Amino acid sequence: MIQKLGLIAVPTVVMALGLAPTAGVAEEASVVAIVDGTPITAEALDDVIQSELIALRHREDQLRRQGLNNLIAEVLLAREAQGRGVSVEELTKIEIEDKARVTPAEARAFYEANRARFGESDEATAIQQIVEGLGRQRERERRAVFARELRSKYPVEVRLEPFRVEVGTGAAPPRGNPEAPVTIVEFSDFQCPYCVHARPIVNRVREVYGDQVRYAFRHFPLAFHGLAEKAGEAAACAGDQGRFWDMHDRLWKNQSKLTVPDLKQHADALGLDTAAFAQCLDSGRHAALVKSDAEAGERLGVTGTPAFFINGRAILGAQSFEAFAQVIDDELKRAGRTPTKASLAP
């Protein structure tokens, strides 16, 4: 894990960064400071704040792509409206607003299923809130889907180069086609609720894209999730018996049962060699592996979970299928492959 300058003594900084009070260092990189004759280079500075710099680059790349996608969508919407002989407003109503509208029956059904969430609100007010809130959500989703439909209809050449980082797949064997042109690496925490919410999206991506993607998992237990580190070790211990993915799937489905006794029960339910599993788990055999994954994630700018890297391009947080599909489709095009039509489905 990268240490910060303010937390360690100056001699330690000099030794850790390979600095020496010689003039030769200045020839290798630009000097940003000189401390009692010892130069500190821009390269050394960047090494110390590497994870923070990468996180900023990820955010910058995300903002640029969001802005570019919005501009592309506006141009395509205008082109389609022109082709149909209608205004952009009329096309928006026909293809987005009307198709995203929430009917009274749907609003009432949602209210009945979630009545407790509305507290003391009267029924009419609650239903109106549902119509507006659910309608906005559906409109965002429909707008994204329609934009992708138009991008498949009209030629779009994106020249903005994405920001990438080199991401290893870790110790667990990746799922999917080893020759797939797209590799997705997830840094995740088995105790993280947002990671559980991301499971349907991850599963849909794997189902829709099939052999075009392979998926890898790496551990990133958060400090305030006290059971996550040992759960990661349990998955690795199951991996010793060739059952990493079986344990991985079971832990997501049983997130409330992650204590050590629970983990051993999961191993028994999966039919593992329970004695070997228990010895592995109790000894902390894979604690270093879990820690190594987390440190790798930090160096890549990961600060929370889930964090995904698609061919080295970051998608941070539990985002929509459309967010994944945009990046995957772009990567497939860059590899000379045709994205599957199924990815256009809402």
Image: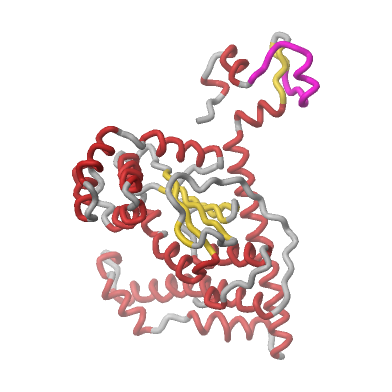
Q: Position of residue 65 (x, y in %)?
A: 65, 59
Find the residue positioned furthest to the right: 27
Q: Nearer the viewer, residue 325 or 338?
A: 338
Point 49% across, 42% down: residue: 303
Is residue 26 highlighted in magenta?
yes
Q: Position of residue 292 (x, y in %)?
A: 45, 36
State which region is magenta: 18-33
Find the residue positioned furthest to the bottom: 85
Q: Position of residue 162 (x, y in %)?
A: 67, 54
Q: Nearer the viewer, residue 187 or 264?
A: 264
Is residue 122 highlighted in magenta?
no
User: In the picture, residue 24 is in which quadrant?
Assistant: top right
Point 51% across, 72% down: residue: 141
Q: Is residue 5 above or below residue 90?
A: above
Q: Is residue 292 above or below residue 246?
A: above
Looking at the image, residue 19 sits to the left or right of residue 325; the answer is right
